[in-house]
Image: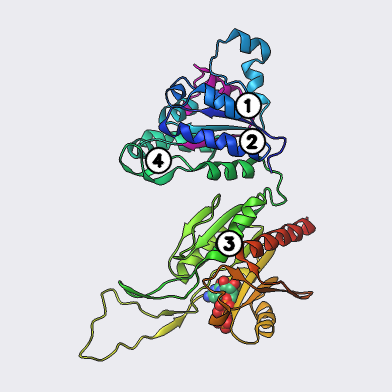
Amino acid sequence: MLGGKRILLIIGGGIAAYKCLDLIRRLRERGAAVTPVMTRAAGEFVTPLSVAALAGETVHSDLFDLTAEAEMGHIQLSRVADLVVVAPATADLLARMAGGHADDLASTLLMATDTPVLVAPAMNVRMYEHPATQRNIALLQGDGVRFVGPNAGDMACGEFGPGRMSEPMEIVTAIEQAVGDGPLRSRRILVTSGPTHEPIDPVRYLANRSSGAQGSAIAEALVALGAEVVFVTGPADAARPLGCEVVEVESAQEMLGAVQDALPVDAGVFAAAVADWRVKTASGSKLKKDNGKPPVLEFAENPDILATVSRLEKGRPGLVVGFAAETDDVIANARAKRLRKGCDWILANDVRPETGIMGGAENAVHLVTEDGVEDWPRMGKNEVARRLAVRIAEALAGKD
Ligand code: CTP
């Protein structure tokens, strides 16, 4: 979805520069043209020859290159792109951007551009957490610069923590969100996903079998159509979706708080399997076997997140989609649930163990709306997600 887009890729001098080779390849596969610029230090990590070969374009690196200047001046170079991407953005490059330096080609282009800028930081964890770097990031965010990553994990320097550059596909997703032409571009959508854990005591909890696979797939499908997605998830097994703002919660009450913080949104998809009850007073210390007497747990009802959002008088999303996990009378229960909770659509599925749906790779859903019921054939959860994302895009377009 990047056909016809031009990305000005500024490669900074960090070990993560090697990932840019794959990034260029993936951008070109998606139809984007890539104009590469390398800082002097970047040349210590990847060669201009490999970058030029993959981009299919000359690498720019010298501010005072008279031949290049005669062909295309650096001011023009900074403006012909749809997006300027800085990857890897080292601590030094971020500092120079924040300070408004213009002492080499990369920094001069960044100062001269009127094009949106996306930055993928990469540096040692201490350097990332240093107050100076955090200050620079805050300044740049205030200037409207977008960020993708960094991720946390093992680092090339042997340390562990935030500072690893985002993977090429994560950067591609962020680029698609910034300049792609998807039908959900500039839409903000909330997705809840996964089970919730309701504590009994510090070591035990109540949970359910939801893997979070359907919620993750829906979030990724929405991102692929250009949406900005806030993904609020309980402790799910499924991998977190790429390109979303991920908010991790444990209990239903925490999930409600995170959902309220994420509003306003254009649409909400409530795929989480929220526990209906919590233990009224979770014990602060581990419950002990009391002479063979089992503990008696008193339950309290959890807030219904879907119903709460559906019934908002102010700030209700334009489209609210719930799920109905049923074991009997699937359609009848789903219709009743739609009306009871006040949402616009319900995706109903049969979660009897023999269907293999809960925790499995496939789903067979019925879309229940005001207009009736559509039975979708059994298909992969990714395909259900894609179909739903397209329907959401159509519905939101119809509301404009
Ligand atoms: N849901 C919610 N908050 C809750 C319970 C459910 O937001 N406390 C949402 C789920 O995310 C889902 C929908 O409500 O979108 C229906 O969930 P489901 O478990 O099928 O329904 P319940 O409300 O639990 O109703 P019942 O147990 O009576 O079937």
Q: The residue tagged with tag 1: helix, strand or loop?
A: loop
**Dot 4 and dot 1 residues touching (CB under 8 Å):** no
Front-most of residues 184 and 49:
49
Q: Position of residue 48 (x, y in %)?
A: 52, 22
Q: Which residue is mark 2?
A: 28
Q: How is the image coloured?
A: rainbow
Q: Quadrant of ligand 1?
A: bottom right
Q: Report whether the residue tagged 4 is closer than 8 Å to ligand 1.
A: no
| Up/down of 291 relative to 34, above or below | below
* Amino acid type, residue under disc 2 in the picture: Arg
Kindly report the distance in space between the C-alpha atoms of the residues bearing marks 3 and 4. Answer: 27 Å
The image shows residue 372 at horizontal and vertical percentages of: 77, 76
Q: Nearer the viewer, residue 228 or 42?
A: 42
Residue 399: percent from left, percent from top: 77, 59
* Residue bounds of the magenta highlight: 98-121
Disc number for residue 163 = 4
Whichever of labels 4 and 1 marks the residue nearer the N terminus, that label is 1
- The label on residue 56 is 1
Position of the N terminus by quadrant? top right
Q: Amino acid at mark 1?
A: Gly
Q: Residues within 10 Å of mark 1 (few under 14, many from 20)?
A: some
- In the image, which disc is placed on residue 191? 3
Q: What is the distance, in whole Å, between disc 4 and disc 2 at their CAs?
A: 26 Å
In the rendered structure, the answer to whether residue 280 lies left or right of residue 87 reads: left
